[in-house]
Image (spheres, rainbow, N blue to C red):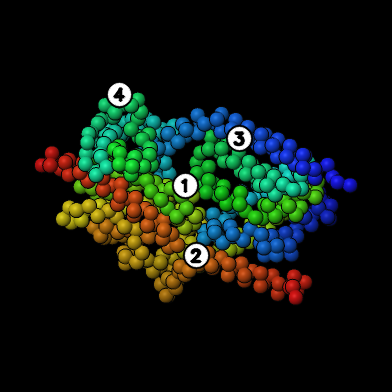
């Protein structure tokens, strides 16, 4: 005898029922948890920017963010301004806004600007908004933090790089969506991120070169800060190349701003 | 084991030795290759799989009489995907830091054939309690191999265990490195995981001839 569950009609009803149950359960959960999740993501952005500026709870070996309850306050007091530089498709600066000017125009905080969307806009020949967070690090030195975004081996990678007015790195934070644990995922480990500290983005004659994550640069302790290279992670070549590429592509756009800053200072 | 009958105890014990999911059933090989470059990642993955296997096997077992056999694989896939996504969402909302660590494992768990394999081979034909034990047993068997492979790959590949240097400093040439020892970078790449798993299979079959197929 045929079993009840083997009938075509049963199979179809079961399939529809299961999809309805599972679909509504997931939709309900996702929408009811969304406010909490986006609040967590907002705080994480603040923590990331503060981390790059050197304001964090790092212990000896691991990277630790400033705690979430302290982050908003620290963000408000350490980030003095959030500039928004708008460039056209060729990278020419169209306008510069302070945080207040930008907020008045868009009702959005500059640190919530989605770098991925801005990249897509520039790719389609549109304008691109470049956020730049100006603040002071623990030693009271003025630093400029810029967000970067790119591709790793499996999925998106992103980060924040803090620079001084000579485009020398003062701190870096990297993160990823789905790099391989133990290999590419190690870009968010201290030993990798700390290597960027003090590294020059410009060559000695002032041209933009970026920083390459290099294999066999014969400088594993990273003593040479002017070679525009840091030591790569074994087994994570593609992720490392992704880090080099996003630094080169995204930070290059900030070069005119720093050139301008220097002429003003002199 | 006074708590469990002899048959039930075998459900936990067998996968640890003579019916190991990785070395005998050849399930879950992909993740055994992918994430064993470091011991810590192996342990996190093992705990995640333990959780999903235990709960998933019970859910499938409870549904075993209503799942139509024609679409049972897709029904199993939906169950495991739903479970994992729910856990991921809840962690993102209430334990964000933890969810950041685990998020990369989510995709790996959904596609892990050890989970589908046990649903199909066991939970569809057995009651919830026995299915739960089977899930836990197989997840532990999986964990044992992952941790052994992770241990050797991290030790020989990076000279560290759980991120702590145990053999000295390779750059300053201290400890073992002072007498000319070098890390084997090849251990960090997937092929070496396969070779380590192969060596485990070899040892296991040498000790127990019953496992050798003609």
Residue A9 visible (yes or no): yes
Q: Secondary structure at mark 2?
A: loop
Q: Residue at x 46, y 31 (%)?
A: A39
Q: Quadrant of the C terminus of chain A?
A: top left
Q: Which residue is mark 4?
A: A104
Left of A235 or right of it: where is B54?
Answer: right
Q: Residues within 10 Å of mark 2 (few under 14, many from 20)?
A: some
Q: Secondary structure at mark 3?
A: helix
Please state the horizontal and vertical placement of residue B136, each as a whole percent of the image: 71, 51
Left of B58 or right of it: where is A205?
Answer: left
Query: Which comes before the other along the chain, label 4 or label 1?
Result: 4
* Inter-mark Cα distance, 2 to 1: 21 Å
Q: Which residue is mark 1?
A: A177
Q: Residues within 10 Å of mark 3 (few under 14, many from 20)?
A: some
* Inter-mark Cα distance, 4 to 2: 52 Å
- Badge nearest the viewer, 2 or 3: 3
* Inter-mark Cα distance, 2 to 3: 37 Å
Q: Are marks 1 and 3 on the same chain?
A: yes
Q: Which residue is mark 3?
A: A26
Q: Are marks 4 and 1 on the same chain?
A: yes
Please give the chain letter of the residue carrying mark 4: A
Please state the horizontal and vertical placement of residue A115, each as a whole percent of the image: 36, 40
* Inter-mark Cα distance, 4 to 1: 32 Å
User: Do the numbered discs 4 and 1 sit on residues whose CB atoms are within 8 Å?
Assistant: no
Q: Residue at x 74, y 73 (%)?
A: B213
Q: Which residue is mark 2?
A: B189
């Amino acid at each position: 005898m045929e079993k009840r569950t083997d009938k075509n009609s049963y199979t179809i009803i079961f399939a529809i029922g299961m999809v309805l149950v599972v679909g509504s359960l997931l939709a309900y959960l996702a929408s009811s948890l969304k406010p909490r999740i986006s609040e967590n993501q907002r705080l994480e952005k603040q923590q990331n920017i503060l981390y790059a500026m050197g304001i964090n709870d790092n212990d000896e070996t691991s990277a630790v963010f400033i705690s979430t309850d302290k982050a908003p306050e620290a963000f408000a007091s350490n980030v003095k301004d959030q500039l928004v530089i708008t460039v056209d498709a060729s990278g020419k600066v169209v306008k510069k806004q302070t945080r207040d000017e930008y907020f008045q125009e868009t009702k959005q905080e500059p640190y919530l600007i989605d770098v991925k969307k801005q990249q897509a806009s520039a790719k389609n020949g549109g304008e691109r908004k470049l956020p730049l967070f100006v603040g002071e690090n623990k030693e009271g030195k003025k630093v400029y933090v810029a967000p970067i975004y790119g591709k790793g081996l499996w999925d998106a990678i992103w980060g924040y790089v803090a620079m001084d007015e000579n485009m020398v790195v003062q701190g870096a934070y990297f993160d990823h969506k789905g790099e391989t644990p133990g290999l590419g995922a190690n870009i968010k480990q201290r030993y990798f991120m700390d290597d960027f500290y003090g590294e020059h983005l410009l060559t000695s004659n002032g041209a933009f070169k970026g920083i390459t994550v290099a294999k066999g640069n014969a400088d594993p302790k990273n003593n040479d800060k002017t070679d525009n290279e840091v030591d790569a992670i074994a087994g994570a070549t593609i992720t490392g190349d992704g880090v080099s590429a996003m630094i080169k592509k995204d930070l290059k756009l900030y070069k005119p701003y720093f050139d301008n800053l220097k002429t003003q200072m002199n | 084991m006074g708590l469990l009958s002899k048959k039930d105890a075998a459900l936990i014990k067998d996968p640890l030795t003579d019916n190991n999911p990785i070395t005998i059933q050849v399930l879950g090989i992909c993740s055994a290759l992918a994430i064993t470059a470091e011991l810590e990642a192996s342990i996190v993955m093992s705990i995640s799989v333990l959780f999903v296997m235990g709960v998933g096997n019970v859910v499938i077992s409870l549904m075993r009489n209503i799942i139509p056999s024609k679409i049972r694989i897709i029904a199993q896939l939906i169950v495991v995907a739903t479970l994992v996504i729910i856990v991921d969402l809840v962690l993102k909302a209430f334990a964000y830091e933890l969810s950041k660590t685990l998020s990369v494992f989510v995709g790996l768990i959904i596609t892990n054939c050890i989970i589908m394999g046990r649903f199909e081979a066991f939970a569809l034909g057995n009651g919830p309690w026995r299915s739960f034990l089977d899930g836990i047993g197989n997840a532990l068997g999986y964990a044992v191999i992952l941790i052994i492979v992770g241990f050797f790959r991290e030790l020989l590949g990076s000279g560290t265990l759980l991120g702590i240097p145990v053999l000295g400093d390779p750059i300053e040439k201290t400890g073992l490195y002072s007498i000319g020892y070098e890390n084997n970078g090849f251990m960090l790449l997937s092929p070496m995981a396969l070779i380590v798993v192969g060596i485990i299979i070899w040892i296991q079959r040498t000790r127990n001839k019953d496992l050798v197929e003609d």
